[in-house]
Amino acid sequence: MRRNYSSGVRVSPLNDLTKLLKLHVEVYHNARVCGDWKIETDPEPAGKTCFHMATQGGCRLSVPEHDNWILAEGDLVIFPREIAHSMVSQQPQKGAQQHLLISQSQNTAGTSMLCGEITFANPGFQVLLDALPKVFVIERDDSTPWLTELLHLILAESLSSKTPSNPLLDKLCELLFAYGLRHFIEYQNNNIGIVALFSHQKITRAVSAIHKKPDHEWGLISLAAEAQMSRTQFAQTFKQLSGWTAMQYLTWWRMQLAWSYLDTGEHVATVAEKVGYRSESAFSRAFQKNHGLSAGAVRRKGKADK
């Protein structure tokens, strides 16, 4: 009797993906900007992932060759791959530009701006970032209660701190980015690259099955059965949605899991078996090809970081 690994209560494949995000946020600006202020970013080279939030007050965001936005208090803007942009006061202000500690400038007119850069330990997630638009804004409203909650926590930390940033604020911003990424994919754009797989009613069943049993000997026939589609229809739909074959996605997912296991110090042979490889050497070759690093190097770095 064929087992259906996607039956029963399923965890969203997107949630599975979010769990594997190992990211680090470095807050490089958390201050009250006063006077006739303007913050410009012209990255060279471009490509870093960054975010901004007006934690008190609002501002105008300008992105060359893209739309301009008015960011209200608590709105979040994310640049998956940082490009040139600028932010200015929403209303004209007088005086020289100043950057003041938030906890010591509550009686001073201005806008409190939070800015950070995100780095990912696992280079495999670049595929996801590359599928996203160059910039997107998530507004704080009734549909984003998590933004309000995190804004309150970030403000409380900023108002009690004697420094612009600290490890706790960095952690709060990691949550801010993860929530923002998930919200955008789920509600604002779910037809981008591999993300389109997670929203297709039938294809997502096969993706969930892969996530649930990465060590299973999956093939096109068994995955099509999980999706309750013909083999031809499944293969064509999968490729049309994502640009990938189902087997390419299977390999990619196994390699992301493998990175997370190796990063905790698990032995290469153990990890190979966990993600469906019967040969350690075959796994090592696939890992090197996918990540550009050896499995052993990732394991050693993970152990050293601990």
Image (cartoon, rainbow, N blue to C red):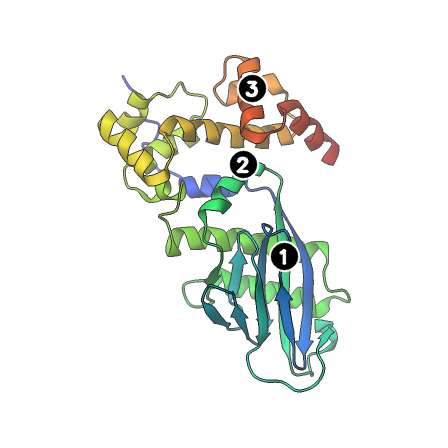
- Sequence order check: which comes first, mark 3 or mark 2? 2
Is label 2 or label 1 in front? 1
Where is residue 52 drawn, in percent x and y?
Answer: 58, 63
On screen, 3 above or below 56?
Answer: above
The residue tagged 2 is 124
The residue tagged 1 is 43
- Sequence order check: which comes first, mark 2 or mark 1? 1
Quarter location, residue 6: top left
User: Viewer-proximal residue, 41 or 3?
Assistant: 41
Q: Residue furthest bottom?
A: 94
Mark sitting on residue 285 = 3
User: Viewer-proximal residue, 15 or 125?
Assistant: 125
User: Viewer-proximal residue, 16 or 138?
Assistant: 138
Label 2 to label 1: alpha-carbon separation: 23 Å
Query: Mark 2: few, some, or many residues within 10 Å (few <14, many ≥20)?
Result: some
Tell me if residue 70 can be seen: yes
Quarter location, residue 184: bottom left
In the shown orientation, is residue 104 left or right of residue 233? right
Q: Secondary structure at mark 2?
A: helix
